[in-house]
Image (tube, helix red, strand yellow):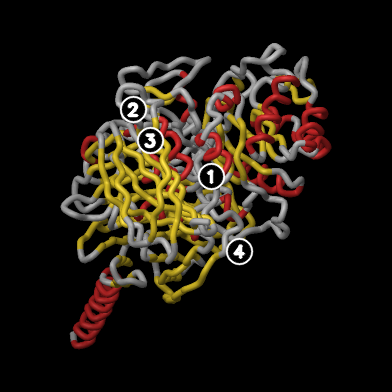
Amino acid sequence: MKNIVTRLTGMILIVLAVLAADSVRAQQTFEITSPDEQTGVSVMVGDQIQYSVEFNGKQILAPSALLLTLEGVGKLGENPVLEGDERNSVDSVIEPVIQQKSEEVTDRYNELILNFEGNYSVVFRVYDDGVAYRFTTDLGQEKVTVKAEQLEYNFADDYSIYFPEEESFMTHQERSYLNLYLSEISSERFSSIPALVDVNEGGPKVLVSEANLQDYPGYYLQGTGSSSLTGIFPHVATEEKLEGDRNLHVTERADYLAETSGSRSYPWRVLAIAEDDGDLITNQIIYKLAEPNRIEDTSWINTGKVAWDWWNANNIYGVDFEAGVNTETYKYYIDFASELGLDYIILDEGWYKLGDLTTISENMDVDELVRYGKSRDVEIILWVVWKTLEDQWDYAFNQFEKWDVAGIKVDFMQRDDQWMVNWYWDVAKEAAKRELLVDFHGSYKPTGLGRTYPNVITREDVKGMEHNKWSEDITPEHNLTLPFIRMVAGPMDYTPGAMINATEQNFRAVFTKPMSHGTRAHELAKYVIYESPLQMLCDSPSHYYEEQNHTLNYLSEVPVTWDETRVIDAKVSDYVLLTRRKGDTWYLAAMTDGESRDFSVDLSFLSDGNYTAEIFRDGVNADRYASDYQFVIQGVSNDSSIDIEMVSGGGWVGVIRPAE
């Protein structure tokens, strides 16, 4: 009997020890804060891995699980066995090849690495401007199949969200932003990213996105009918159907997300956090999380402005030749670009026979246009459908290199499954070998590829100016939403520059003679507020020639990259007031939505000395005739202030130079 009791006691002690060990494991919590200690992340390791986020003591993200399921390996994050943790702090400076917002990027964060049995880790980074995590694996096998990834955002309350709703995974990701409550989004609705959550009662704005997307599909946000969102992914395509020369529809998909390396780092899951709305405009967390530049010699990568043909339908006039897709028309564009000091022109759709890059359209001589352009210091960028480029890869890149064009504008990909994501990287790498710039249109959002391959100089993924040709979606309110959401991800090829400007009452969608919704000053301010190192002038050269005045001088001189950016005041979808510096010249710009607004701006950001401000402001009659503007010049200094008055859909821009 004594032996039985002893054995029972021993068994009970063992059970209690196991339960105690499980309890300890279930209660393991790791804390990590941002360098400025405003943002805190708690990582809980129990029967799953969860994390939560606080900002200024207010919980914004409730515990949210993360899980990666690999075929034949298991569920990384389920019943995890922690082997150890590491902590790092980084405070460094990145000098970007392309100075989109500033000449330096401060890279400062605290890092927590949790290492688990099974040769995988989860890495958390907490910046002053956001939070990110990712899985890393070292599984000792060449390939693994990713069956699923559990990605959830359990927000602490029923916040509102700017939701770029999608209809399918076949998408240009050019969406309007629906302002909804999280609970209004059912499981049948989903959106692309980035999406912006507004934490109520004085909380921050939280932008949901991802960074360093490689060899993996992009993700989308699906509703749950509650305050939670989950990530969903396009699976690997197994059957496809081509429609025309460009629309490759997926008709069947596999039951897995990706087949990838067993030893790798997965994409970062990112929450960009901004206490003030304007902080979103200067947020560079996506860029900081991307891999460093891989191009050894970047001296050939030149930013600049582009005369663009397609938006204005080649509507040039007052000439002695028939306008259209022909050599004479593009020589006219080259002459215009040269006279204005623009760096590039684009040959958009029509220069080659669709579906066949070996056949140049009648009346087009690309060799002659490249030669003529170089004689006038203007380079050529060629538009191409992605599928044709893929099908004729070697011929196309060899021909682009032989012609010595400056770059390519690749269009209509409309997907971000694993294969297509890899294709973007292949294009970037091949184009870099040939010293070609790349502008991706019909694309998914930027995730940092432009840092790794800075020849990927801009990207569309924005409901921009072209939509004025067929819709009424591009309202001033829409224009005032983009800088806080889409532009946080990276440069956006919105393609501004309309010289026909209309009020809300007068706007019409006209495909062959398009206009913009908003005032002329609103349009000019886009060149300072919107970021694209390859910035377009979308309208007809003939329209610009009619502006033989201060407007044309401004468009000629306004920079496309910046040494410094400061947001003075801003509110999502309502207004932006900011200043950017290039050298010793400051550009002060403002835009408003459908409401008229007034500001008084203190110019204390200027250095000592006297300055001259060249100002474009809404004209006296701009509320009736949107193209009306006034140009004034006044002297200012750093103890001056400037009054800014904008009508509905209005704008304001001032070029502030040291006085001679």
Q: Which of label 2 and label 4 is nearer to you?
A: 2
User: Residue 174: x percent and y percent?
Assistant: 45, 32
**603 or 640: nearer the viewer:** 640
Which residue is at a point 52% across and 40% down the rendered structure image? 554
Which residue is at a point 71% across and 55% down the rendered structure image? 299
Could you tell me how far apart the alpha carbons at marks 2 and 4 are, in whole angstroms?
66 Å
Whether residue 648 can be seen here: yes
Could you tell me how far apart the alpha carbons at marks 4 and 3 are, in whole angstroms?
49 Å
Q: Is 59 located above or below residue 600 in the figure?
A: below
Could you tell me how far apart the alpha carbons at marks 2 and 3 are, in whole angstroms?
18 Å
Could you tell me how far apart the alpha carbons at marks 2 and 1 are, in whole angstroms?
23 Å
Q: Which residue is mark 2?
A: 622
- Residue 71 relative to residue 480: left or right: right
Are dots 2 and 3 in contact, CB under 8 Å?
no
Which callout, 1 or 3, points at the residue further toward the start of the chain?
A: 3
User: Residue 126: x percent and y percent?
Assistant: 38, 66
Q: Is 626 located above or below residue 488 in the figure?
A: above
Q: Which of label 2 and label 3 is nearer to you?
A: 2
Q: Which residue is mark 4?
A: 140
The single residue placed furthest to the bottom in the displayed view is: 2
Which callout, 2 or 1, points at the residue further toward the start of the chain?
A: 1
Graded by Cα atoms within 10 Å as few (under 14), some (14 to 19) or many (20 or more), the crowding at tag 4 reads few
Are dots 4 and 1 in contact, CB under 8 Å?
no
Are dots 2 and 4 in contact, CB under 8 Å?
no
Which three-letter amino acid code belongs to the residue tagged 1?
A: Val
**103 or 225: nearer the viewer:** 103
Which residue is at a point 76% across and 45% down the rendered structure image? 434
Tag shown at residue 368: none
Are dots 2 and 1 in contact, CB under 8 Å?
no
Q: Is 514 located above or below residue 641 in the figure?
A: above
Whether residue 267 can be seen here: no
